[in-house]
Image (cartoon, rainbow, N blue to C red):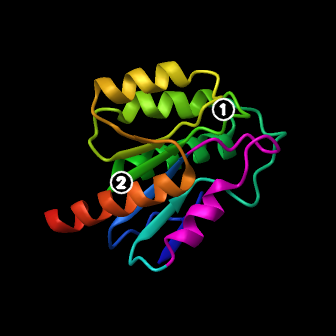
Amino acid sequence: MRVIQAPNKLDISDVSIFLAGSIEMGAAINWQTYVIEKLKDLDVTILNPRRDDWDNSWVQSIDNAQFREQVKWELEAMERADAIVIYFDKDTKSPITLLELGLFARSGNLVVCCPEGFWRKGNVDIVCRSYGVTQVETLDDMVDGLRKLFSEVLKRE
């Protein structure tokens, strides 16, 4: 397994998985580390937007070079990924994660984890059901769903 963190170059030569979802520093659990640990035996590239050098003081504006670099990295990584997992932490609002679900709901390569208690779970449930998105309740179920999706991606190659 290889892990590419934002904003490093997207040098992808094998099957890749993008980790979309709640980050909201201080509110969301570091679920990305958990998923990476659970999938470490797979021969894949993990695309992780959670970056070690993120600075909460950066203005979230198209005019801010660091912020623009982050958003563009995430968009390109999602476009190029073979699979995308989306996790909604119940203790967050995650507006960007909701946006990402909307952008990629029709992609056919999503696994979504939206536990009870997420403030817009009903919206997530309806979008997932409407577009045939694999949806699970727990991070462990997400890992299992991702393994299933991963095996399907390999069959297509």
- Quadrant of the snapshot with the C terminus: bottom left
From the top left corner, tell me how far across and down residue 141 is, in percent.
48, 53
Q: Is residue 34 left or right of residue 38?
A: right
At horizontal 82% and vertical 44% (from top left) the residue drawn is 26
Tell me the residue at 67%/34% (across/down): 90
The type of residue carrying mark 2 is Ala
1 or 2: tag closer to the N-terminus: 1
| 3D distance between C-alphas at marks 1 and 2 | 30 Å
The image shows residue 145 at horizontal and vertical percentages of: 39, 54
Residue 157 can be seen, yes or no: no
Q: Looking at this view, is 120 or 140 the one in front?
A: 140
Q: Which corner quadrant of the image does residue 11 belong to?
A: bottom left
Which residue occupies 59% across, 53% down? 49
Q: Nearer the viewer, residue 58 or 87?
A: 87
Residue 107 image point, x, y percent: 28, 39
Looking at the image, residue 56 sits to the left or right of residue 16; the answer is right
